[in-house]
Image (cartoon, grey):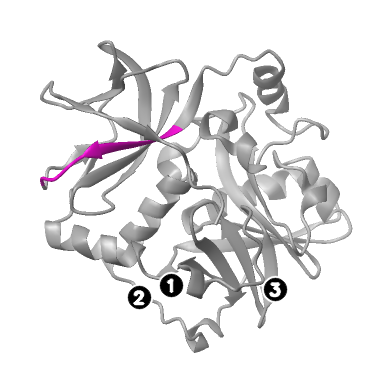
Amino acid sequence: MTIACPTLDLRHAVANARASANLSVPLAWAALTLTGVDALTFLQGQLSCDMKLVTAEQASLGCLLNLKGRIEASVVVISIDSGYALLMPQAQIAAVKARLAKYGAFSKVSIAQGMQEIVGLIGAEAIPSSLAATPYAATLEADACYVRLPGAARALKVCAADTSNNDALAINANTAVIAAWQAEAISGGEVTIDQALVDQWQPQELDYHNLGGVSYQKGCYMGQEIVARLYFRGQLKTGLCWLRAPWPETIDASLDWPIVADDKAVGRVIALAWPDEQQLWLLASVRLAAENLQWRLSNGDVVALTRHDFIRHA
């Protein structure tokens, strides 16, 4: 899959957007609400995270797995007055709702698409000071729920759809703002499962276990045996990496180009973004023992890659 490189002017605009202290980002996200006396028990048996840890002050990353332990959908779970809301890309809503309805037929749980507006926030001034600095911390303020995301200063704002236009943070839907959000997600090591990534990855390969998205102590859920085996037998051979490459030109890039070491393929690119005029950032799953990483382009040339630690806390 080829990704068109932005113009240098647009890359400059992305860098400026990333540096903003107060930026609101439109997201094509939606929510499913689960209510009823069995909502907690039901979700505990469906999601990879420990639902008992989800409170008004603590959200959670989680995922739905298939029988092979691969991710069908990723969600951010928040507590609401009458149950829980699962936040996810709009394109995943129908499939997730159908799966939950199938397995929830004999539970006292109601599943519906919520009416919430979900907005991304970048910058310290955009995020309430009451929100803790750890990933997936949550807080309620002025009729909205805020959830901290991995990264220097990133969060989700969840509010009633008809009140978002009254927010002092005006939504700016330009390309640079969206690209800035994508770049900051890479630096935070956050992978959101979209249609292109369904059924391809086990949660540990995407570092979900280090973000609280996988519990090894709770009971069974679909795919749990595979996930537990990887953990208890120490069989995980690949891990999520933030990689940077010099990229001063306006040359397109492809998710299909392999990451190599000693001329052998050792990793796959999951996402990429141009954060400024000089660099290209990659989010990739790479063999843990691999060193001297390079990216092999379609013409046979290679570009040196450097690893960087994720920015997980504000």
Q: Which residue is mark 3?
A: 140
Magenta stretch: helix, strand or loop mostly? strand
Relative height, residue 140 to residue 273 (above, below): below
| First of labels 3, 1 by sequence position | 1
Q: Which residues are magenta?
A: 241-249
Please give left or right for residue 122 compared with residue 9 in the image: right
Q: Confirm whether residue 105 shows in the render.
A: no
- Say which of 255 and 45 sits in front: 255
Q: Is residue 254 magenta?
A: no
Query: Mark 3–mark 2 contact, CB under 8 Å?
Result: no
| Figure quadrant of residue 128 | bottom right
Under mark 2, the amino acid is: Asn
Q: Which residue is mark 2?
A: 172
Q: CA distance from mark 1 to mark 2?
A: 7 Å
Please give left or right for residue 49 compared with residue 305 in the image: right
- Say which of 34 and 130 sits in front: 130
Query: Mark 1–mark 2 contact, CB under 8 Å?
Result: yes
Q: CA distance from mark 3 to mark 1?
A: 18 Å
Q: Residue at x 70, y 50 (%)?
A: 101
Could you tell me how many numbered marks the image carries? 3
Residue 311 x, y percent position in the rendering: 49, 47
Under mark 1, the amino acid is: Ser
10 Å crowding of disc 1: few (<14), some (14-19), many (20+):
many
| First of labels 1, 2 by sequence position | 1
Q: Residue at x 61, y 23 (%)?
A: 68
**Which quarter of the figure is the N terminus placed in?**
top left
Circle number at residue 24: 1
